[in-house]
Image: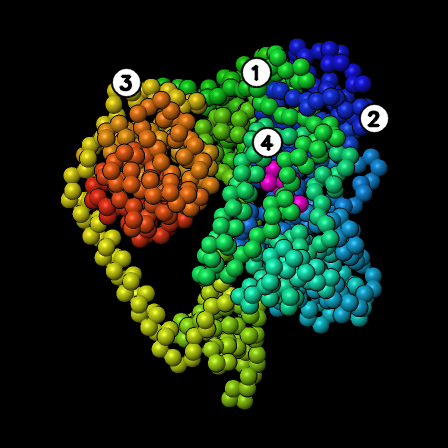
Amino acid sequence: RPAPLAEFPLSAPTRVTRFDRFFAPDRPPPSGRITIAGAPEGHDAFVLGELAAGGVGTLLHICRDDGRMARTAAALAFFQPGIEVITLPAWDCLPYDRVSPNADIMSRRIDALTRLAEAPMVGTRRIVLTTVNAVLQRVPPRALFRDRVLTLGRAGRIPLDRLVSFLERNGYTRTDTVREAGEFAVRGGIFDVFPSGAPAPLRLDFFGDTLEGVRSFDPLTQRSTGTHERVVLKPVNEVLLDDAAIQRFRSRYREQFGTVADDDPLYEAVSAGRRYIGMEHWLPLYYETLESVFDYLPDAAVMLDHQAEDVRKDRVAAIADSYAARVEAMRAGRAAAAPVYRPVRPEQLYLEDREWVAALARRRVGQFTPFTRPAETPLAVDAGARPGVSFAEARAKPEINLFDAVRDHLADEARAGRRVLIAAYSAGSAERLRTVLREHGVEDLRAAGSWDEAQTASARIVPIAVLPIEHGYVFDGAALLTEQDILGDRLARPPKRRTNFDQFIAEVSSLQPGDLVVHAEHGIGRYDGLVTLEVAGAPHDCLRVIYAGDDKLFVPVENLEVLSRYGSEDTEVQLDRLGGVAWQSRKARVKQRIKDIAQQLIAVAAQRQLKQGEAMPPPEGLYEEFAARFPYPETDDQQKSILDTLSDMASGRPMDRLICGDVGFGKTEVALRAAFVAAMAGSQVAVVVPTTLLARQHYRTFRERFAGLPVRIGQLSRLVSAREAATVKKELAEGRIDIVIGTHALLGKGVKFEHLGLLVVDEEQHFGVSQKERLKQLRANVHVLTLTATPIPRTLQLAL
């Protein structure tokens, strides 16, 4: 039996050694989940590092999302740089999506799974960071990654044809120039390859079959950047199309979905051994059995991020919604406008609730929370961190100099015997903070690369480190002060790997035979490879494009700008005919349609300028009561956005306001306040969202916030039954529904409003211009509030 918790006093802040005994592999696990309280972001990484350093074996930490995982990894590199940290990200696409995961994400996943499939060396201190989304998804069996790894060292021997065969079997693509993970190129004895998980591509120099050198190089300039002693080649995709996998897929696909028609491009592509966009979402059909992340780490203790269980429940609901939508579309025969989609059952690709509970029941499990230990929770220990100081008051008062206040705070902490560490988001922002603080009298600021370096510095020195933590805290005789605590907002973000999503073709190597392309003058064709033609007695490189009737067009490489990628996932598109009039007619119709839409936009905008808007001032007393239901303090920007929105609605002119804010920054609360004011003024409110899941979430949120108020709320999406949808439309037209939340269904011609006063468009980047103008046209003086988390130039242009 585990030792009783009473043996471990919990009164004063202390080091982690007080509760690391619960996670020691040589002790029985406690009979329940341990809550580690007082562990805000940053300090949870410190606790993880201390546990791993204490020899508790492998730790599996499940973060809420990828952003949290990235910040935890950066914090671990600072607090415990000697511990091996493996990060396993989730696919960056929705459940049952039509697109494949990003190549970089897939490369990182393969690298992590390959390392997890290998047995760790004795005494290895290892922390595995993953997310809720990643751990819920099943993964290929461990044997796949153990048997498909090739290690080459200098002076090693391997025939080039065997190396090419290995790479092709493991999902690599042969190109002329290597630029992204999973590509390779051969030029005589020079072999370029971008392995999974590698930070940069590698250039292998062969003399015959002997590897003479390994160099990394810059994929943009193609210049060498360093030398290496060996190269490790791993699979580049979780789906490997060998003969056995193809045969398994064919038989299981027919078993699960019945007879396969000729219009199933997925089945045709896999049967021919070709990769297909989104084929990874049928992962269970390629392997005898799938495993889970828990299977890869049978003896690991598990740490759960704060609110990880809530995120898991939302993810399970999203998976169920996405599956139901695909099944409904398949049964209703809606696949006529797009390739047929036959989804595998959720339990085949994702862990069920019972599997999640069973996996955790056999392990030592800890749950982080930033709050203090609840008195009624018996299995809880104190990590010793408490909230730090915030300079919001100093920022709000013009008479107080912010950096003088920081200087005085540093002096107070030094007198109290606490070592202060300042954390900045980037090296540049750290240097700016250091310069400004020195101008205000803080002389001894030194860069610190690790926690040990900060701890061992002289007492008069204030360490400053690059550490992406949002808010500071106090613990164990030390205080962490962050850039956001001082300045109130993030001035810099961690750099991201640059990726080119441009639809236009920059070079021939970005095309693969079979890709659909659009010629500016001749329309849609299929790229058929690069060929060399004799023109005027000299060789000339041309792209061969196949059109209807097997007509061929040769495009010189120097005229590449006339081609662009076909912007659709439908590979069954009708090819144009060379010399035909269909393409020119289609272009003319599109140009005319653009002109028509532009004229409609101008007319609506002019009408809205001339119309007197409906003044909607917030009702005194009632509005304050409604605002008090918001369970969080409003941020300064959020409060300003609310006041500006309400001011627009009360001004007597039609509102056109765009709210830009990152996910979780409180845009929905702005919409709730505006909807309350409009509903209390006797107007109807329409909230348009792009997905059924978001519609359901908003419907639940609005129902909870408007509970007890004389406001009727309806929902309109494809998950609403036909009878209920008809009732909602009827009551909207009669004015008996005050607020309606729905998807594109609200844009239908059959939807009529009795008195529409406010239109809220959420995630506006998912809607076209004409779609958003459709509701504006219903009443020229309707107030429009647009929400987006994507402040891109297109969004700003649409706002204007």
Compute the Cα span from label 3 to label 2. Answer: 62 Å
Can you see residue 232?
A: no
Can you see residue 407?
A: yes
Q: Which residue is mark 2?
A: 26
Q: Quadrant location of residue 361?
A: top right
Compute the Cα span from label 1 to label 4. Answer: 34 Å
Compute the Cα span from label 2 to label 4. Answer: 27 Å
Residue drawn at (58%, 12%) of the image: 415
Look at label 2 and name its amino acid. Answer: Asp
Q: From the image, state whether disc 3 or disc 1 is nearer to you.
A: 3
Q: Which mark is residue 163?
A: none
Category of crowding for the residue at label 2, using alpha-carbon neighbours closer than 10 angstroms: few (below 14), some (14–19), many (at least 20): few
Compute the Cα span from label 3 to label 1. Answer: 44 Å
Q: Which mark is residue 308?
A: 4
Category of crowding for the residue at label 4, using alpha-carbon neighbours closer than 10 angstroms: few (below 14), some (14–19), many (at least 20): some
Q: Which residue is mark 3?
A: 621
Q: Is the stretch drawn in magenta largely helix, strand or loop? A: helix
Q: From the image, state whether disc 2 or disc 1 is nearer to you.
A: 2
Q: Is residue 213 left or right of residue 722?
A: right
